[in-house]
Image (spheres, grey):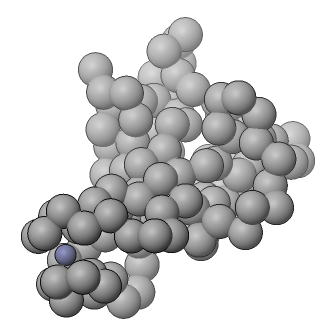
């Protein structure tokens, strides 16, 4: 059983170091934690027991995420913290962290139930 899930960053994903056009991913902990690979628009899976992270079905949630290093060269970007926006368990968006969201210790926050 994995410890986190992954979300593919949309749009241009060229590595700032080696220029490789590889997919970039961020890691987060919400839903069933089993190394799921999600894209924007996907609904998160839930296991339905104590191994889930978070609360299913919430209207609006933000999740802290951290970028994986470039898979081609291992470069770790300077901006590596992201905010994932979730609406009704569907991944609504992801953006570089604005450091304006007050996450609790678990790394997510329900802003609207
Ligand atoms: Zn690279």
Q: Position of residue 4 (x, y in %)?
A: 40, 35
Task: Please state which of residues 93 and 18 is positioned toward the viewer in this rendering.
Answer: 18
Q: Quadrant of ligand 1?
A: bottom left
Residue drawn at x 46%, y 70% is 78
Residue 57 is at least partly visible in this image: yes
Which quarter of the picture shows residue 2? top left
In the rendered image, which quarter contains the C terminus? top right
Q: Considering only vertical position in the picture, is 32 above or below 81? A: above
Can the viewer see residue 59 in this picture?
A: no
> 57 and 9: which one is in front?
9
Location of residue 100 in the rendering, given as x and y in whole percent from the top left corner: 82, 61
Image height of 7 relative to 29, above or below: below
Residue at left offset 52%, top offset 22%? 52
Q: Is residue 24 left or right of residue 56?
A: left
Residue 113 vertical position relative to residue 54 in the rendered view, above or below = below
Residue for point 31% across, 85% down: 16
Counting from the top left corner in percent of width and height, residue 10 is at: 42, 78
Q: How many marks?
A: 0
Question: Could you tell me residue 93's position as x and y percent?
Answer: 60, 69
Residue at image location 46% in from the left, 22% down from the top? 47
């Amino acid at each position: 059983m994995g410890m986190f899930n992954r979300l593919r960053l949309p749009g241009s994903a060229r590595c700032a170091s080696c220029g490789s056009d590889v997919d970039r991913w961020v890691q987060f902990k919400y839903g069933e934690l089993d190394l799921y690979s999600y894209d924007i628009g996907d609904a998160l899976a839930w296991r339905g027991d104590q191994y889930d992270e978070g609360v299913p079905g919430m209207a609006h949630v933000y999740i802290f995420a951290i970028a994986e290093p470039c898979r081609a060269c291992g470069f770790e970007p300077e901006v590596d913290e992201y905010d994932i926006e979730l609406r009704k368990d569907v991944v609504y968006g992801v953006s570089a962290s604005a450091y304006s969201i007050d996450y609790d210790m678990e790394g997510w926050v329900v802003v609207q139930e």
